[in-house]
Image (cartoon, rainbow, N blue to C red):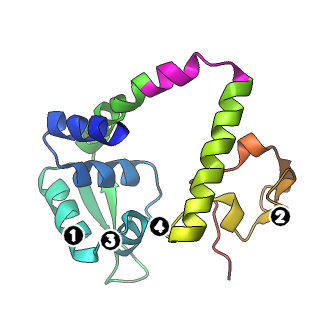
Amino acid sequence: MLKAIQWEQARILGITPLQLQILLFTGHHTDAVNKVAYIAMELQLSRPTISDAAAALVSKGLLRIEKDLKDRRSYSFLLTDTGQEVLEQAEKYTEELYAIVGKKPAREKMHLYQSVYTIIAGLSNEKGGMQRMCYNCAHYEGNKKRQHGCRLLQRKLESAELQIDCLYHSTLS
């Protein structure tokens, strides 16, 4: 259902569903991960597919290319002002979902989040894929049941505070 709504939103905006995914990703991540290889890994698509879709967004004036000062071969995608405006329009497809969930009591929302988190963590373990979740972060400490903590933030975490897409995620080595 969400995918169908997202596809309809992409059509309304005049972009492809993949371009919408790239726009949403770049709008919510730092330039450090807004690179072709990383986005390809995240969306589980080939680099050429991401390159072509992102190039179309650049030609539409929604993304711009920022060269990496440390590595001349590398670059990141950043939203333009127009891209930011389109992103704000694009995110409206979730308004109905937020309205439905927003009416639920806090305890029910917490249980829903914990269930979704557990499902995503389970699928990530079985199917692979890139997930910047607490459970596969070098900073995570706990037993994945009821005790959770983050060494980076230096604090205990409630189950409802576990992150699915954490900006501070560090891969396990």
**Amino acid carrying mark 4 in the image:** Ala
Which numbered disc, 3 or 2, marks the residue closer to the eye?
Answer: 2
Residue on which disc 4 sits: 32
**Amino acid carrying mark 3 in the image:** Val
Which numbered disc, 1 or 3, marks the residue closer to the eye?
Answer: 1
Crowd band around label 1 with a 10 angstrom C-alpha radius: few (<14), some (14–19), many (20+): few
Residue on which disc 2 sits: 141
Which numbered disc, 4 or 1, marks the residue closer to the eye?
Answer: 1
Q: Which residues are magenta?
A: 97-106
Q: Secondary structure at mark 4?
A: loop
Q: Residues at badges 1 and 3 in contact (C-beta under 8 Å)?
A: no
Image coordinates for residue 57, horizontal then vertical, percent = 19, 54
Residue at the spot 63% in from the left edge and 63% down from the top edge = 169
| Dot 1 or dot 2, earlier in sequence | 1
Image coordinates for residue 25, horizontal then vertical, percent = 39, 53
> Is 133 left or right of 107, judged from the image as shown?
left
Q: Which mark is residue 36?
A: 3
Q: Nearer the viewer, residue 3 or 17?
A: 3
Crowd band around label 4 with a 10 angstrom C-alpha radius: few (<14), some (14–19), many (20+): few
Q: CA distance from mark 4 to mark 1?
A: 20 Å
Q: CA distance from mark 4 to mark 2?
A: 25 Å
Q: Secondary structure at mark 2?
A: strand
Q: CA distance from mark 3 to mark 4?
A: 11 Å
Which numbered disc, 4 or 2, marks the residue closer to the eye?
Answer: 2
| Dot 4 or dot 1, earlier in sequence | 4
Work out which residue is located at the far top of the displayed protein and give it: 103
| Dot 1 or dot 3, earlier in sequence | 3
Which numbered disc, 3 or 4, marks the residue closer to the eye?
Answer: 3
Q: Is residue 82 above or below residue 162?
A: above
